[in-house]
Image: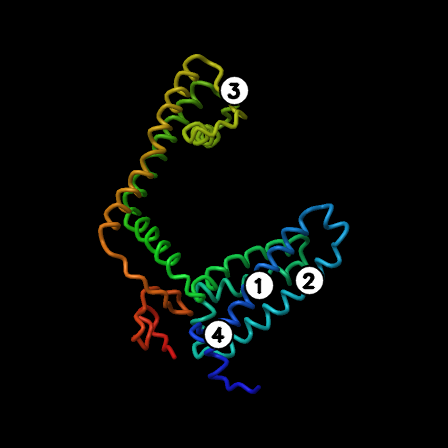
Amino acid sequence: MNFSKKQLAHIVFESNDRASRTFDAVVLIMILGSVSVVILDSVSELHLKFGNTFYFLEWVFTILFTIEYALRIWLTTKTFRYATSFYGIVDLLAILPGYLGIFVANTHLLTVVRALRLLRVIRVLKLGRYISEADFIKGALKASAAKIQIFLFSVLTIVLIMGTLMFIIEGPEAGFTSIPVAMYWGIVTLTTVGFGDITPQTPLGQFIASLIMLLGYAIIAVPTGIVTSEMSKRSQTKIIENTRSCTFCGKDGIEPEDNYCKNCGEKFG
């Protein structure tokens, strides 16, 4: 069956008919297969037994993704815009590690970045309920950005002050060899991770460490409260589900009757 360039572009970039959905389903299978091969190849026992098979399959997937990327470049009317868009960069990153593996050992394992391509497939397969929920969370995080920035700056200030105090009180003998190292200890303690690689030895240092630990429990709840508050506000507003988005720039919320992308100006159809 012969296809014109316009018909091929519709199959590759759209997802509103059987041919387009079949293409997307094939890409989905390729992504899952490729990522599975990389994961299994990292297991030493499987690598020793099936290493050659994994190597062959990985190159098969790499060549197929290269053909797909070249096809997208050829079919798009705005090559540079697609190549520099989010999805264009992800598509390129999906094939680069395979070729880099020829020159740098183990870089082929970075092909797991192909999992990012699932974002495109989930979008084009019209899983609207997931997209609307993702947009809901994204909107809440965006609305909380300024408050979270102030919060992080405050935490950094606390870590700087506490780290400097610990450097003065404990000194290199206890492992606090510099203020940056002491700040690292402060972050580990404040977040209640507690690796234990550096520990205060003096009573005063241990008292300050206890204060930081208690402060950590209070601080952890702050960003959660900020985001939850924004999500609560947004939940009172009806979110209109619209699964159509621009393939080139990834802009959501494009109405069915729109002929051009509101963000980048790309023409649809």
C-beta proximity under 8 Å, tags 3 and 2? no
C-beta proximity under 8 Å, tags 3 and 1? no
**Tag 1, which secondary structure?**
helix
Question: Which residue lies at the image location 34% right of the left edge and 31% below the top edge?
Answer: 219
Question: Which residue lies at the image location 54% right of the left edge and 63% below the top edge?
Answer: 28
Question: In the image, is 172 to the left or to the right of 45?
Answer: left
The mark lying in front, picked from 4 and 3, is: 4
Residue located farthest toward the top when viewing the structure as drawn:
203
Label 3 vs 2, first from the N-terminus: 2
Could you tell me how far apart the alpha carbons at marks 1 and 2 are, in whole angstroms?
Answer: 13 Å
Question: Which residue lies at the image location 55% right of the left edge and 59% below the top edge?
Answer: 114
Could you tell me how far apart the alpha carbons at marks 4 and 2 are, in whole angstroms?
Answer: 25 Å
The mark lying in front, picked from 3 and 1, is: 1
Mark number displayed over residue 29: 1
Write down the residue under mark 4.
20
The mark lying in front, picked from 4 and 2, is: 4
| Amino acid carrying mark 3 in the image | Ala
Write down the residue under mark 2.
57
